[in-house]
Structures are given as structure tokens and as C-alpha cells.
Image (tube, rainbow, N blue to C red):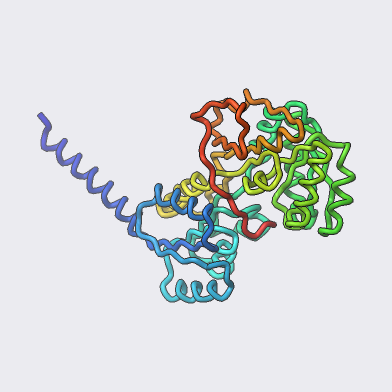
Amino acid sequence: MITLCRIAFLISIFFFMTTEISKAYGAEIAVIKSQYLPSYQQAFNGFKKVYAGELRVFDLKGDPQESEKVVIKLRKDPPDLILAIGLLAARVAEENFHDIPIVYCMVFDPSRFGLYRKNITGVALDVSPSEMFPRLKELFPNARRIGVLFDPEKTRRTVDLAIKAAQDWGISLIPEEVHSAKDLPDAARILLGKIDLLWLIPDSTVVTPESLNFIFLTSLENNLPVVAFSEDLVRAGAVMSLSPDPWTVGEQAGRLVQKVIEGKIPINIPHSHAEKIKVSFNMGIAKKIGLRINREALNIPRGDLIELISPEKDVKLNPKAIKPGKKLHEEGLP
């Protein structure tokens, strides 16, 4: 039989938990989305799976004038916390709200855009080099020299970190600087013959429609595999991409929001990378360049999402590991 003391104890625990939940879900949270993109919506849905409270949602529509309207509304009725989805949303929040906690997600290289203030934390939209190179080594065991094109004014920090991480895995990362779009063809030709694989990073000087057309045509002519950061680029001509899973990024952002609501100061919450990675392959491109992928490595239990684009009939993979993919768009490349 349950004693009266035991009942009183259980009731007190119940009321404590109810108060804490009410406090969390009673917070005024404003969600600012840069614009409507499928990947942003996936991140938002992942966030809502973790955080079930009321939300005020604003869409900037990729428009600076719309951004001004949203800022005016939020200044009139300030929220307790802002969730910013995408680079434009994160920059608008960072520039205009210095006393409100901000959690960002779906942003490439956040350090470059001043998103390391005391009131900000978040989840970067990139795959850390320590996560990427082991996968490349497993999937492409013969690729020991990897080339990367980059603009030093935009992505030097990314490349410097990657060089060290590559060395830890016995890989030589060979960088070639590109200071403007017109420099890219010559820089790419310098790398040809020196590398076994070309790695594309989110750098707006390198990643343009014209440069991608040149890179993918050149890679086909020289049987050179290109690894990118987005499944859209795999559809365009890269053989593979490693990209964060937007839903998981949204879930991570939700957990960060909960920590802030519970009283943690954003500056004391480490900025993080995506916990789950999506690996997309274009098997048609792989066949055209005569590339053999270590398919056994696909079944390594990392929890990755595996997607095949233009799959060949003879491809045999673990069906449980294959997930249908949706386009991942990038906004505001560094």
C-alpha cells in the first residue's frame, strides 16, 4: 500500500515537472526563416519534433525589405528567444537583437559571419573534416591526394582545418587558390594530374554555374571524381556528396533552444556540427568515369543516410540503409 507520504512526494514531483514543462513551452519563441526552401522546411519540422511550444513564424522571403518589416514587429513585441533558419535570418537576428538569445541553424561557416557573439549558439550546415575524411578514405581507398579550389579571403580557415584533418588520415590535401571566377580554369588545370579526387567546398568564388559546368566537364574528360557538399551538385555532375541531414539539424537546434530556455547562456553552449550525415551517390557518373566505390564501406554502421541518384541496376546495397532524398539548396555561400 502506498503511504500518504509517498503520495505527497509523487504529487510534488508531478507539479514540479508540470511547472518546468509549462515554463519551457510558455516561452515566446520567434522563428525566422530566410526564405522557403525544402531543406529549411525539413529543419523546421525537425525542430518542431523536439520543441512542442507555441511559435511565431516569420518568412523573410529572401528580401531585405521584408527583413526590415520583421525586425520592426519583433522590436515592438520582443520574443524570449529567436530561432534563425538560414544565413539571411541569422544575420538579421545577429545585427538587430543583441540582448535576445539566438539559436541558428542551416548556416555554412558561421564564424565568418560574426555568429559567435555571447547571445548566439547554433548548428553549422557543414560536415566537419574529422567526419568527412574517414568516410572518403573508406569509400575511395585509392584516393590519397585530394585537391581543393578555394578563395583564401572566404574559406582559408576551412581549408587550413581540413589540411590538418586530412594528415591525420594519411591523406594529402592539395589546395589551389582562386581569387576570382576567371582564375578557376587555370587553377583546376594545375591540379589535374596531381590529384586522385577533387573536393568542392561551399565557396562562392568557386561554386558558380559557369565554373561548375567547367569542373564537371573537365572531371568527365579526365576520369576525375568530384566530391561535393550538396546532393544538388551530385545531380549536376559530382560523383558523391557529404551533407548534413536537415531534419537532424533542426532537432539539434531544438535541443539547443531547450537548454537556453532552461537557463543556459548561449555563449556557454558549444556551436556544433550536424550529428547525422547524408551520403549521396551518382552511380551513373561513377560508371562513366570508371570509378570503383568501396561498396562494403556503405554498410559501416555510422548511422549515415545513403541516397542513390541515377542508380544502376546492378547496384546492391542494404535496402534499410537507402533513404529517399530531397533537394538540398544552399543560400548565401561564404
Instruction: Pick out the residue farthest to the top.
Output: 296
Instruction: Pick out the residue farthest to the front.
Output: 313
Q: Residue 221, image x and y in percent?
A: 83, 41
**Residue sitting at x 40%, y 47%:** 50
Q: Residue 140, image x and y in percent?
A: 72, 29
Q: Give the camera-side residue of 3 and 326.
A: 326
Which quadrant of the figure has residue 104? Answer: bottom right
Q: Seen in the image, is 4 located left or right of residue 51?
A: left
Q: Seen in the image, is 50 located left or right of residue 184?
A: left
Q: Give the camera-side residue of 323 and 178.
A: 323
Q: Is residue 87 above or below residue 270?
A: below
Q: Residue 143, image x and y in percent?
A: 77, 31
Q: Give the camera-side residue of 95 and 49.
A: 49
**Residue sitting at x 78%, y 54%:** 211
**Residue sitting at x 53%, y 50%:** 268
Q: Is residue 263 above or below residue 303?
A: below
**Residue sitting at x 42%, y 50%:** 258
Q: Is residue 287 above or below residue 24?
A: above
What is the quadrant of the N terminus in the image?
top left
Q: How many marks overall?
A: 0
What is the quadrant of the C terminus in the image?
bottom right
Q: Give the camera-side residue of 312 and 170.
A: 312
